[in-house]
Image (cartoon, rainbow, N blue to C red):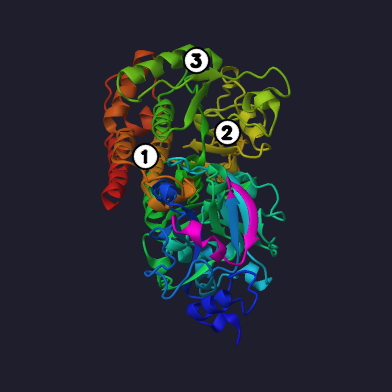
Amino acid sequence: MPLSSLSPSALRSIIREQRQYIENTSGIAPGYLQANVVILHKDLADDFEAFCHANRSPLPLLYRSKPGEWGCPPLAAQADIRDDCPQYCVFEKGVLVSKVASLAPYTAQLQDMVTFYLGCSFSFEQALEKAGVPVRNLEQGRNVSMFKTSMPCVKAGPFHGPMVVSMRPVPQDKLDAAAQCTHQIPLAHGGPVHIGHPALLGIKDLSQPDYGDPVELSAGDVPVFWACGVTGAEAVQSTKPALAFTHSPGCMFLTDREEATVSHQASESEECPLTFCVSQNPLHYSVASKMAVQRVRAIEELIGEDPGQRGIRALFVQDELLKACLSLSHSSSVLITTGFPTHYMHDPPEETDGPPGAIAMAAMLQALNKCVVIVSDQRALEMNRRIMQDAVDRGVIKSAVPMMSFESSGPDSALRFLCHDGDPSKPRYDHLVAIERSGRASDGNYYNMRGVNIKHLVDPIDDLFTTASAVPGITTTGIGDGGNELGMGKLKEAVKAYMPNGSLIACDVAADFAITAGVSNWGGYAVACALYILNLCSIHRHYVQKGLGLLPTPEQRSLWAASLPSVAKEEEMLHILVKYGVRSGKTANLGLEVDGLTFHPTHSDVIRRLSDLSMEKLHQE
């Protein structure tokens, strides 16, 4: 009789009596929870339990035994942890000294030890198969691949160490199904913690796993990583207790507890995860709930209103806002640039569209603990620094964002600006955002919407974007409302076809994501609101945090909410800009009376509705 058809109790009996060699438990006892095992002295038990609670994805706690308790009544009848795993690891002061088939010789020591049973990803392999997702390690007759990562677990007492992940290749068109069915089984680590290039987890070579067997990818497969309970063994090695035991990786304890039933309607639930590719170099997917995605799409639709009747809807591409913000949510250091000298005959030549949106994005990114800098033209640098300080003083943003300029002084200037020592493997920033920033046309000039060349007023910040396109790990976003803005080169054919003077003014420099808005400031406000929505999404936060640590506290949520854009904040920004002589570039289109600070109803209404959509998500949580 094949092992896969036997009950967990029958399999434990075979293992205990060593009647048949079982190399690993992957693929057997389908439909039942399997458990990682960590056995520690009772004096360490409370700290290790706290460690599990702080790192729930790699260490989902199924049961904690009493000292000297061999069984685990909530999980299995007539169990004996001394003999019910196919193989155990024995650690002395954090060093693996042996692997044994039985812990019976250590019975005396075990009297003062506590056993922790932790969820295992083998438990969701049947769910993957039922969802139509091939399980490559089973197809290849191998143990799953497991890797130590560069992600440190949250420390608790003396326990610390890197998170371990398991990797399963998944066809690209099955990524949603894989995320959705495993998300429903949190006791088996839940949904993925990373989808894409292994180097983003500090993994150098998929053919050289730290534990288990190498598993080959088929054509069209994407590496998908789940948190792994072998994290417990790594913590034992890092903490160095006098004596400890774990299961041998892949040799799990088989419980009698059936895995959670996976709903076949999972994809219809508002809280089901959806996956999106946010980078090709390196390959990286992000995840958010269906509800959060719907909210962001509603925001994207809202900012597409066209008060200037330019025909801006012709440039709209769905999910550019969503993907840009998913990428920004994963970022650690963001560079923002703005400045469009459309009033070329005045001093200063800048317009009011751009700076308020840039500061709104910076405020939310700051609240999310991202490092942020803003780059402007050298001629406007001191003015922009004063504007920034006034924004802080008036409560528009919590703290001043560093301001700098970029002026090319040679062929490698942009690379040296973007990367430490000009080394593409050491980028200073992982995301560049341009909002209402003059963009270089195909003839090398810069044009306003009337087709006037304003190149003499514009520093070559475009070079940062063109250089970033060849630096792995830097993503770029452009926000515009006419097609002549930096980054909108991604849409240049549509700009040439549909926008006034499009063949002349179209920006030739493409960003990875191009967000189209009726007013560019709306695009900046939309980014801030979308980041807020995504970071309130528990599915997205779990993924960004790699399943480590706790969800946001009420205090964090309040800080994020306070950083949302508002009509009052934009009014403050307009007061500040007018103080320095900055004029509106859209007075004719929107009816904005800059000197009198009177809003067009459409403009203020859009800002209020953006805020309402963002706060609606908060009430849903």
Numbered disc in front, either 3 or 1 = 3
Task: Give the Cα separation between the discs numbered 3 and 2.
Answer: 23 Å
Q: Where residue 373 sits in the image (x, y, percent)?
A: 50, 25
- Residue 210 included in the magenta stretch of the image: no
Give the residues in magenta. Answer: 92-113
Q: Residue at x 69, y 71 (%)?
A: 140
Label 1, on which residue? Answer: 307
Spatial CA span between label 1 and label 2: 20 Å
Q: Residue at label 2?
A: 505
- Given residues 121 and 21, the one toward you in this image is 21
> What numbered label is drawn on residue 132?
none
Residue 196 image offset from top left, x and y in percent: 60, 52
Q: In which quarter of the image is residue 289?
A: bottom left
Count of number-bearing discs? 3
- What amino acid type should be assigned to the residue bearing mark 1? Pro
The residue at 47%/66% (across/down) is 181
User: Which quadrant of the figure contains the N terminus?
Assistant: bottom right
- For disc 3, the neighbor class at 10 Å (few under 14, some 14 to 19, many from 20) is some
Give the vertical position of 607 relative to 299 (above or below): above
Q: What residue type is labelled 2?
A: Ile
Q: Relative to the observer, which residue lies in front, 167 or 287?
A: 167
